[in-house]
Amino acid sequence: MPDTQKKHRVMTKSQSKRIGLILRWILAVFLIIFSIFPVVWIISAAFSPVNNLANQQLIPENAGFDNFRALVSTDIFPFFTWLWNSIKISFLTTFLTLTLTTLAAFAFSRFRFKGRQGLLKAILLVQSFPNLLAIVALFSISKQIGDIFAALGLNTHAGLILVYLGGAMGMNIWLMKGYMDTIPRDIDESAHVDGANDWQVFTKLILPLLRPILIVIGILSFIGTYGEFIIARTLLTKREMQTVMVGLQIYTSGQYTQNWGVFAAGALIAALPIMIIYLILQDQIVGGLTRGAVKG
């Protein structure tokens, strides 16, 4: 009897492991299909001659490049101008965000001054309110600034970048500061003993060690700016100044002129910069996020 009970327990454990493995595989396959299906559907719509998502087939008949030709052949909708606008705005916003965030995080991490904790909490509190709640105020402020400095008002990329910078600083400062806190202060003290000033410590010693978190914040900032729609749609009304996300909306905004096939083709091309950047720098994301997420 004891041998029989042992064999039964062994079989029960083996069956439980097998069932658990099967369930994990089923869950993994479901999640993969759930994640990939919208992308596959957009790819199918981009090559399908049927200009209707309701009648769209996963494997379209008579697939071709007609939607891509229609996308680039018209001067009324300057797709590549929109694409360049998005890349330019996202790149400049990312560069300025990294510059200001790094300097601010260095000050909060390495210096001790009155009001330091209060400022950090205030930054986090302001960040908790999304820009969407202030969209009317942002429009009004941009219009009034434009009356004085036309280059920073409505329908200007510089004005849009300023708005993006204001919304991106809070959480990025905390993320950068948390990562910078993991760097031992002994490095700073040793450099100061050798005669280095704070700027030399920052540029020569601290900044090279921040490469992983700089890449993480850069990727997140670029993707967030590149895919933003509401603020860009509000502040940029001239067609030639709009971003690609705002421009693509034109293809589906008409009541009787919805070009879903052309929209899908444009969305597919617009996704290429993000895919390329992510594939090149994906190895840096995990390390930068995990190392900077503990200390605050």
Image (cartoon, helix red, strand yellow):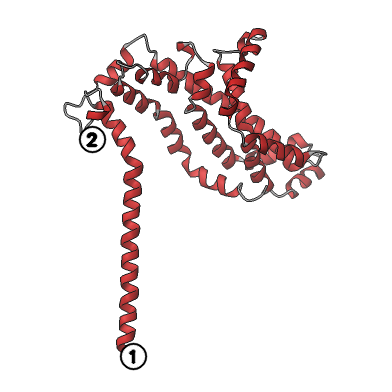
Give me the residue at 38% from left, 12% from top: 77
- Which labelled disc corresponds to residue 238? none
As drawn, 12 above or below 171: below
Percent x, y for residue 190? 77, 47
Q: Is residue 102 above or below residue 178?
A: above
- Residue 52 placement: quadrant: top left
Q: CA distance from mark 1 to mark 2?
A: 58 Å
Please state the horizontal and vertical placement of residue 117, each as a whole percent of the image.
76, 42
Q: Say which of 285 and 231 sits in front.
A: 231
Return the x and y of residue 42 as percentages of the image width and height: 31, 31
The residue under label 2 is: 58
Label 2 is placed on what type of residue? Leu
Q: Are marks 1 and 2 in contact (CB under 8 Å)?
A: no
Left or right, 35 with reference to 291: left
Q: Label 1 amino acid?
A: Pro
Q: 10 Å neighbourhood of mark 1: few (<14), some, or many (≥20)?
A: few
Residue behind mark 1:
2
Would you say 274 lies left or right of 132 here?
left
State which quarter of the image contains the N terminus: bottom left
Identity of the residue drawn at 74% across and 35% down: 200
Q: Nearer the viewer, residue 145 or 162?
A: 145
